[in-house]
Image: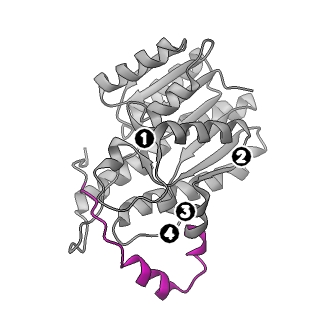
Amino acid sequence: MQPRSILITGASSGIGRALALVYARPGTSLSLIGRDRERLEDAAAAARAQGAEVGLGVLDVRDQGTMAQWIEAADARQPFDLVIANAGITTGLSPGEIAEDPSAVRAIIGINLIGVLNTVEPLIRPMCARGAGQIAFIGSIAGLRGLPYSPSYCATKAAVHAYSESLRGRLAASGVQVALVIPGFVKTPLNDGIDATKPLQITASQAAARIQKGLQQRKAVIAFPFPLYFAARLSRILPIWLVDKVMACFRVKIPQTHERIR
């Protein structure tokens, strides 16, 4: 059964925008959250052109009070069947750098982790009270194993993985299904600035289609591409010294985020 009322954060570009368009159809109500009004309105126009009803929240996911107020009001008007906590940024290190800027680290934690909590927390009790609903967390293959060129990004995604796994068993008894999405390289504006080999990279539209299919099948984990996912899982059981040595061979340059604590 297709969800009729859907909340998506980070909907102004990348995977979030692609998900909005995958779900956009007559009879579907989309609530899209993002910070860039122009890009968010562009995504909304494209979704409306496909027949969806669209509501916009030009919000910063780090703002707990405003997020809770907006989400609770939207859920009261039309209860959400599906919430996708997608908003996120990236940051990392260039060759020769040894430590990330502490302010950048705290900024990525604010968006990638605190922002996820601010998205999901207002809906846990209402969904459980209704005995229905689906919560999807957008994680990353980088959350499966710490990478030497993106420490804080890996840390935030690992935390999202653990949080979603903890909620999954807890909420299942109340009829709420939790899914963890673990994508590999997806071509988005966020990732375009990363200077690195990106094996098996897919488009945002392809990623959104896979996510939608996995959610429709009620999968607990939606991971792709499988070879990259398998390699990341394998790295957890191989000798640590070996994996560290292999990882050190990759040349990766990840721009530092311009986001800072607010």
Inspect the image, locate mark 4, and give the three-letter code of the amino acid beneath it.
Answer: Arg
Q: CA distance from mark 3 to mark 2?
A: 19 Å
Residue 85 locus on image (x, y percent): 51, 40
Helix, strand or loop at label 1? It is loop
Residue for badge 2: 219
Nearest to the eye among marks 3 and 2: give it. Answer: 3
User: Please, is residue 62 above or below residue 256 in the view?
Assistant: above
Q: Which mark is residue 145?
A: 4
Q: Quick one: 242 or 6, which is closer to the camera? A: 242
Disc with the residue nearer the chain's start (3 vs 1):
1
Q: Quick one: 80 or 257, which is closer to the camera? A: 257
Inspect the image, locate mark 2, and give the three-letter code of the amino acid beneath it.
Answer: Lys
Inspect the image, locate mark 1, and give the three-letter code of the amino acid beneath it.
Answer: Ala
Residue 230 locus on image (x, y percent): 61, 66
Disc with the residue nearer the chain's start (1 vs 4):
1
Disc with the residue nearer the chain's start (2 vs 4):
4
Residue for badge 1: 87
